[in-house]
Image (cartoon, rainbow, N blue to C red):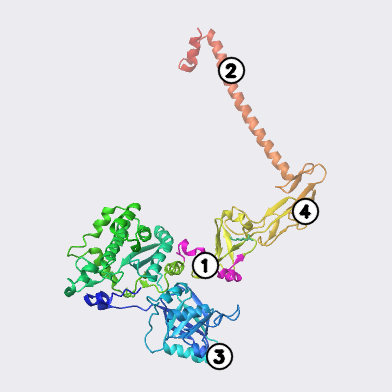
Amino acid sequence: MRLRPTPVLLLFCSLLLSVSGRFVVEKNSLTVLAPSSLVGRHDSAIGNFGAPDYGGSMVLDVKVPAKDDVHGCKPFPADYFKRTSHKANPTVALLDRGECYFALKVWNAQNAGAACVLVADDRTEPLITMDSPEEDEEAATYIDDISIPSALIEKSFGDKLKEELAKKTTVTVKLDWSESLPHPDENVEYELWTSSNDECGPKCDTQINFIKKFKGAAQLLEKGGYTTFTPHYITWYCSDSSMETEQCRTQCINHGRYCVPDPDHDFAKGYQGKDVVMENLRQLCVFKVGNASGKPWVWWDYVSDFHIRCPMRENKYNQDCAEKVIESLGLPVKEVRNCMGDPDVDEENKHLKAEQVAQVGQGERGDVTILPTLIINDRQYRGKLDKSTVLGAICSGFREGTDPPVCLDEDMQTNECLVNNGGCWKNDEANVTACKDTFRGRICECPVVQGVQFQGDGYTYCEAIGPARCSINNGGCWKETRHGQTFSACHPSHMKGCDCPPGFRGDGKLHCEDINECAEKSACQCAECNCKDKWGGYDCACKGNLLYIKEQDTCIGKGIGSSFWNMLFIVLVIIAVMSLAGYVIYRHRLRAYMDTEIRAIMAQYMPLDEENDDDDIRQPLRADI
Ligand SMILES: *[C@@H]1O[C@H](CO)[C@@H](O)[C@H](O)[C@H]1NC(C)=O
Ligand SMILES: *[C@@H]1O[C@H](CO)[C@@H](O)[C@H](O)[C@H]1NC(C)=O
């Protein structure tokens, strides 16, 4: 719905936007890959319907229809634009501007198998945005089903393409939307310019259906801290001279400051523009109050619940019904009312004032002139309001590698991994692949499987890292079992790599070979040794009654080596020395003891005066008396 005030309203109200009106044509790049005479980069303007491949690109062969059908306003023969074989590029239909809606051309080409549509302008002018038809009943039946991207190109460039095609040259182009949205960081800011009006036909239905379908993803993104969403509402204002007219009184609040066109274009009956302004303001305040309490996502719940519970057609589009919804969501009604202020005072409403200011474009964004308008990272989104197309666009706004999980969801996939595994590394035995399907197209990235991180270039190799890696396909290492005995080249104590276990040698990955220790004379080499190789080791027996000592790789017994004798001798000497020392100490102690005893006994009979100075000895002598 292009918000076009009714003619009557226009007469009395000055359209804020017409003062500074600056609509921005959002572009994607188009590169001609062949023929060489045309190679180069061109701009093309993204159509405002269908599904631009934000964040991605397409390589396509250009095809023009037959002479009498260059506008594409009638259905094409079946499969007219279908690619000729699986190996060929998909087809982009090159159609001329004029005679019917852009959207109809694209719809016809899509039905004939085109993967994309280029519309060549029919006049020399700067690029414009191909918009969807407004208030057209028939267009409404197909417009939501357009699922391919489209772009407008300049007339001169279109002529050159057609010239080459007339010579039966194959013209290959690459359309690239990856730079159509900035993607500077790990947070995407986006705004939806919308209206609470629910009686404007197919466009209003598309808008509310989008809000309902997108709600889940929006809330996940918001709760995860990935996005910052803000809803916005457009209003107009009445000029001073028209302020006191009937129109300005019924369509506006705050004395002509904030107006919305009458929803049913009839001032006398039904809801007035004023009612819509009030509900828009309420929705804005629900967002503000929710946001202030750390729950900005509650707006999505409120708007979808309000639409279900308080529709215009059931005559429930009013404050009473709205406040019940607010209460049911656990929001303070009083705060919402406070935020809304008094609609009858002759004063600015700071929230609606801020909305009017925001409506005017700054920088690259351009003015908001179409409702609904989605702005992602300060660029206007072009394309249909449809969950996966919009999500794809939002996802392309993240710096690569910071995409939230919802962007890597199944319905965001491109299935490029199904063909030749996308050219990425994979391991069939472990069923591990580096191909990851994303909205950006496939990427080759070593995966994390069951908590095990793989590292590598993703194209030719990935290697499992960490202690748990042996649990997946034995860490890509060699492993073999024979006769109930298993050897493995994966060692959980190593962070990476494979090493053949002792007794084997090899690369550790594909093979480890048994080492024949006997033949290589690396073990069991003493004269008495009898070597016998076995898988993963060897057996060594000694002749006679000798015993094999593996650590020394020798046999002991009769033929004990001189080193053993030396050792034994040293041990015996140590024992002898220690015994002797012990004996000496013992004797010394014994003598001391006996001396004491003897002297004690003798002391009973003849006191030893010369020992008087020694208390230790005298004391017991006295006690015994
Ligand atoms: C939402 O809340 C945050 C933090 O409370 C604040 O920084 C931000 O400006 C608020 N956004 C709006 C649009 O009010
Ligand atoms: C490989 O893994 C995928 C998904 O992880 C699964 O769908 C498929 O059945 C697996 N294939 C085999 C052979 O295990």
Q: Tell me the residue that label 1 is attached to.
A: 413
Front position in the image: 104 or 7 = 7
Amino acid type, label 4: Asp
Front position in the image: 546 or 481 = 481
Q: Tell me the residue that label 4 is attached to.
A: 533
N-term mark: 4 or 3? 3
Mark 1–mark 4 Cα distance, whole angstroms, equals 56 Å
N-term mark: 3 or 2? 3
In the image, 587: left or right of 530?
left
**Image marks 3 and 1: residues in contact by CB distance under 8 Å:** no
Q: Which structural element holds mark 2?
A: helix
Which is in the foreground here, disc 4 or disc 2? Answer: 4
Q: Which structural element holds mark 4?
A: strand
**Residue range of the region highlighted in magenta in the rendering:** 401-426
Return the x and y of residue 9 as percentages of the image width and height. Answer: 25, 74
Q: Tell me the residue that label 3 is attached to.
A: 168
Q: Which structural element holds mark 1?
A: loop
| Residue 594 disc label | 2
N-term mark: 3 or 1? 3
Return the x and y of residue 175 as percentages of the image width and height. Answer: 48, 79
Amino acid type, label 1: Gln
Which is in the foreground here, disc 3 or disc 2? Answer: 3
